[in-house]
């Protein structure tokens, strides 16, 4: 792939997170039922996972099912998404093993149906020895609930005297997140053009580069992730600092009346 050759191997992101949106619109544009959009979306997942593994991306995190999806969508659609997830796991664990991909999950997964949790655990165990890309599916996930769970854990440590309130650091919060063992995403991709974060990884994306494409998720392929990575590589990450080569003003030498209040 020409685009792959254009990427700078020294500056590949370590962690790409994706908000997969637009399954319903994809189906609507073709006068199909929404569930066919989700089914096509599950195909895109596997294409993107394989590309991630081919380029040696260490972490890929996909927003597959939010707490809000669970609460606000018709029961029939939620049930279909659950069936699709089970089917996806059944059909793809072998390919994950061929591609050295390990699967894990973040979210309130305890609240998912038993037979889905059983499949999820099976897939995690079947791929646990793989050392390539870690595919994280966010399932029944909401960032505010994640933060609430983290704060509860942290408060319990303070209450028990394990940690002093004034000693709490950002790292203490970080180690209570579902993603405690993961680096923060370098790049967040959202499909189907919406300029929203939708309660995804709110803590973790503090310095993440955001890329929004109007392409609907069922039309998204590995090459489109590589385009996003190419765009990411053109950006300069500043983490709140100055652009490279910018000289700081010598404020101390300015007369006081030139200081803007
Ligand atoms: C948004 O489309 C998509 C979701 C509800 C989550 C993503 C789900 C999949 C890609 C399906 C399968 C996933 C796995 C891992 C097997 P939407 O229905 O909100 O689209 P719309 O905004 O156009 O209505």
Image: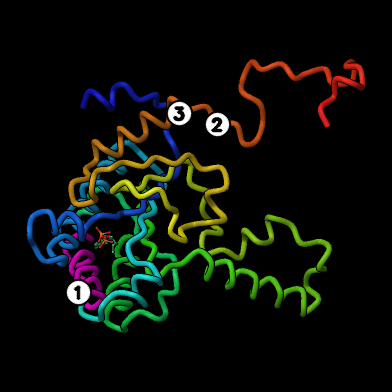
Q: Which residue is mark 1?
A: 80
User: Quick check: which quadrant has ligand 1?
Assistant: bottom left
87 sits left or right of 241 in the view: left
- Give whichever of 104, 207 is nearer the camera: 207
Marks 3 and 2: which is nearer the front?
2
In space, the residues marked 3 and 2 are separated at their CA atoms by 11 Å
Q: Determine contact: label 1, label 3, CB under 8 Å.
A: no
Confirm or reject: label 2 Cβ below 8 Å from ligand 1. Answer: no
Above or below residue 221? Residue 155 is below
Marks 1 and 3: which is nearer the front?
1
The residue range painted magenta reads 77-93
Q: Position of residue 253 (x, y in %)?
A: 89, 15
Q: Which residue is mark 2?
A: 237
Q: Position of residue 62 (x, y in %)?
A: 35, 55
126 sits left or right of 239 in the view: left
- Give whichever of 125, 230 is nearer the camera: 230
In space, the residues marked 1 and 3 are separated at their CA atoms by 39 Å
- Give whichever of 28, 85 is nearer the camera: 28
Is residue 28 on the magenta stretch?
no
Q: Main secondary structure of the magenta part?
A: helix
Q: Which residue is mark 3?
A: 11
Quarter where residue 15 is shown: top left
Choose the circle earlier in sequence order: 2 or 1. 1
Q: Position of residue 94 (x, y in %)?
A: 20, 58
Q: Sort mark 2 into few (<14), some (14-19) or many (20+) by Cα contacts within 10 Å.
A: some
């Amino acid at each position: 792939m020409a685009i792959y050759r254009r990427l700078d191997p020294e500056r590949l992101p370590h962690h790409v997170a994706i908000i997969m949106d637009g399954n319903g619109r994809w189906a609507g544009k073709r006068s199909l039922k929404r569930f066919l959009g989700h089914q096509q979306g599950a195909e895109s997942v596997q294409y993107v996972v394989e590309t991630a593994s081919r380029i040696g991306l260490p972490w890929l995190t996909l927003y597959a099912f939010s707490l809000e999806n669970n609460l606000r969508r018709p029961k029939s659609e939620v049930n279909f998404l659950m069936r699709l997830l089970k089917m996806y796991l059944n059909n793809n664990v072998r390919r994950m093993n061929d591609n050295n991909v390990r699967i894990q999950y973040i979210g309130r997964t305890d609240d998912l149906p038993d037979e889905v949790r059983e499949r999820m655990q099976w897939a995690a165990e079947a791929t646990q020895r793989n050392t390539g890309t870690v595919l994280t599916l966010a399932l029944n996930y909401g960032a505010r609930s994640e933060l609430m769970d983290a704060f509860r854990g942290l408060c319990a440590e303070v209450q028990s005297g394990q940690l002093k309130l004034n000693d709490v650091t950002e790292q203490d919060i970080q180690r209570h997140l579902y993603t405690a063992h993961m680096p923060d995403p370098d790049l967040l991709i959202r499909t189907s053009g919406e300029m929203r974060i939708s309660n995804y990884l709110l803590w973790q994306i503090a310095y993440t580069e955001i890329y929004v494409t109007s392409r609907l998720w069922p039309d998204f392929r590995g090459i489109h992730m590589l385009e996003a990575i190419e765009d990411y590589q053109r950006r300069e990450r500043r983490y709140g600092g100055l652009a490279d080569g910018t000289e700081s003003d010598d404020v101390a030498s300015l007369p006081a009346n030139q200081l803007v209040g």
